[in-house]
Amino acid sequence: MDTVNNMDIKEFKALIYETVKTAMSDILEDAEALGSQDFIESINKARQDYENGNFTSLEEIDV
């Protein structure tokens, strides 16, 4: 298992950079999605379907 105390400064900076970059990308993607009326409507429909039992459980999926 990697630990922080075994990293040099360059490795630690790279780790922080990638973590922040990923988080910012996720935030921007979420903001864009939430700005889409179609996306909001699809979430609401999915919630209604779930509440009404209109879904397939993982156990029912034959993989």
Image: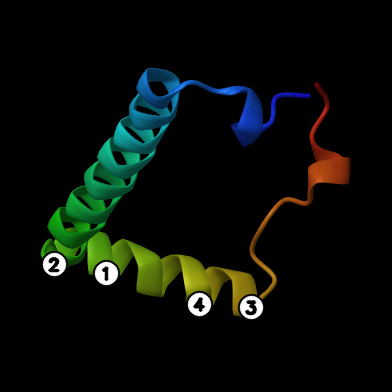
Crowding around mark 4 (Cα neighbors within 10 Å: few <14, some 14 to 19, many 20+) is: few
Q: How many labels sit on residues?
A: 4
- Using the numbered discs, state the Cα–Cα distance from disc 1 to disc 3 in whole angstroms: 16 Å
Residue 5 falls in which quadrant of the image?
A: top right
Q: Is residue 37 left or right of residue 22?
A: left
Question: Which amino acid type corresponds to the residue marked 4 in the rendered image?
Answer: Gln
Question: Which amino acid type corresponds to the residue marked 1 in the rendered image?
Answer: Glu
- Using the numbered discs, state the Cα–Cα distance from disc 4 to disc 1 in whole angstroms: 11 Å
Towards the viewer: 62 or 9? 9
| Residue at (30% x, 33% y) in the render | 17
| Image mark for residue 52 | 3
Q: Residue furthest right?
A: 59
4 vs 2, front mark:
2
Q: Are marks 4 and 3 in contact (CB under 8 Å)?
A: yes
Which label's residue is closer to the chain start, 2 or 3? 2
Question: Which amino acid type corresponds to the residue marked 3 in the rendered image?
Answer: Asn
Question: Which amino acid type corresponds to the residue marked 2 in the rendered image?
Answer: Gln
Residue 18 falls in which quadrant of the image?
A: top left
Towards the viewer: 13 or 25? 13
Tag 4 residue: 48
In which quadrant of the rendered image does the C terminus lie?
top right
Residue 30 falls in which quadrant of the image?
A: bottom left
Q: In what element is the residue under mark 2?
A: helix
Q: In what element is the residue under mark 3?
A: loop
2 vs 3, front mark:
2
1 vs 3, front mark:
1
Towards the viewer: 35 or 55? 35
| Residue at (34% x, 30% y) in the render | 13
- Percent coordinates x, y for residue 54 in the rendering: 64, 64
Tag 2 residue: 37
| Residue at (12% x, 61% y) in the render | 36
Which label's residue is closer to the chain start, 4 or 1? 1
